[in-house]
Image (spheres, grey):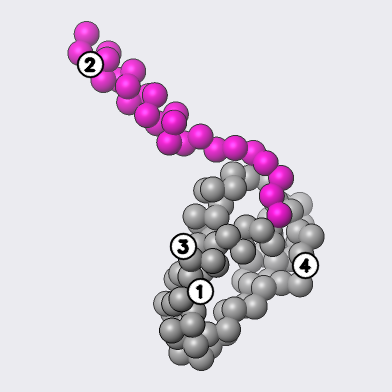
Amino acid sequence: MVSQFIIKNLRSSIQKTADFKQEILSVKTLIQHAIEPLMIPLEIKEQQFNRSRRTSAKIVGDFHWTVEALTIFLKNAIEHTPVCGTIQVNIQKKSDLYRDYN
């Protein structure tokens, strides 16, 4: 009886934390939200941040999870880019099977 209660609550918790929405998202907006909390480290290291000119690019995914993933990615780029270096984000459609992010 107790184990069933625990399993039921565990399932409920997992479903709540792994609630991925499938929305059409602007890549420009995602990058803006991801880089915003990282502006101070960029300034401290005197780094330049440049993003792709392709401002109309869209992807399908969950806004919050994607912003979090991009923020982690950009944070790592800041940490591993030399002082006065440049971080460039280019987004190009390569095929229907995958996208190239560099």
Q: Could you tell me which residue is drawn at 32 percent across and 26 percent down? A: 10
Specify which label sits upstream in the sequence, 2 or 3: 2
- Which of the 4 quarters of the picture holds residue 29? bottom right
Using residue 5 as the reference point, say whether residue 89 is left or right of it: right
**C-alpha distance separating marks 3 and 1:** 13 Å
The residue carrying mark 4 is 54
> Of the residues tagged 4 and 1, which is closer to the observer?
1
**C-alpha distance separating marks 1 and 2:** 47 Å
- Which of the 4 quarters of the picture holds residue 52? bottom right
Q: What stretch is highlighted in magenta?
A: 1-26
Q: How crowded is mark 4: few (under 14 residues within 10 Å), some or many (20 or more)?
A: few
Indicate the secondary structure of the residue bearing disc 2. Answer: helix
Q: Could you tell me which residue is drawn at 54 percent across and 48 percent down? A: 64
The residue carrying mark 2 is 3
Residue 39 got which mark? 1
Residue 73 seen by the camera: no
Using residue 68 as the reference point, say whether residue 53 is left or right of it: right
Instruction: Indicate the quadrant containing the N terminus: top left, top right, bottom left or bottom right.
Output: top left
Residue 74 at x, y = what percent? 51, 69
